[in-house]
Image (tube, grey):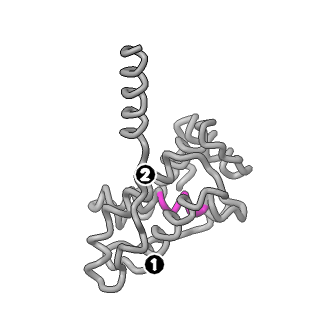
Amino acid sequence: MKKLFLLLVLSVCTLTVFAQEVPNYSAVSLAAKEDYAKAESTVLQATDYLISTPFDKNNPERLRAMQFILKWMEGTPDFTFQIDETPVKISSGNSDLLGLYLACASKFCIENRSLAKDAKAVKLNALKTLVTYSTNPTYKVKQTGELKKVIKASEKGELEQYVG
């Protein structure tokens, strides 16, 4: 009986350790320029949350994470995000997929400040992360025609040519 109890306690502890804690985005101020730099760690938490949870429109935490990232992207003075036709074509009107691409771009820029002004590097690396996420069946991404082309280019080692 003691062994069973110990196993149960260890299982609960393990589940607690692996549960992702989602930040309280409304508590993060984005009023002044300096707030955006302070918020970068929260942006990374939000992007990590998005790229580690299943694609689910009914998950309010995903929506809050996406909204926070977009609000940060709109106001950050440290980064400029260029959105060309590629992510728009890939998303095919699916705002969640477009938001995921933007989250991937944000993550890359914050983690690679020296390459953040290189639009091609940002796009390429955002697409790499998006492909990794989209091809994992756990995340349940419905692949659009253009996303399938990106995945195929990635599989062939031609993603850089796809980006142009």
Q: Which mark is residue 45?
A: none
Give the image location of residue 22, x and y in percent. 43, 57
Residue 156 drawn above or below residue 28: above
Left or right: residue 110 compared with residue 163: left
Q: Label 1: how many residues lie within 10 Å, few (<14), some (14-19) or many (20+)?
A: few
Residue that label 1 marks: 74
Examine the residues drawn in magenta and state their main secondary structure. Answer: helix
Can see residue 86?
A: no
Residue 110 drawn above or below residue 2: below
Classify mark 1: helix, strand or loop: helix
Q: CA distance from mark 2 to mark 1?
A: 19 Å
Q: Residue at x 31, y 56 (%)?
A: 111
Can see residue 16?
A: yes
Task: Please report the bounds of the magenta region as a residue range.
Answer: 98-103
Residue type at numbered disc 2: Asp
Give the image location of residue 26, x and y in percent. 42, 74
Residue that label 2 marks: 48
**In magenta segment, residue 153:** no
Q: Label 2: how many residues lie within 10 Å, few (<14), some (14-19) or many (20+)?
A: some
Give the image location of residue 46, x and y in percent. 43, 59
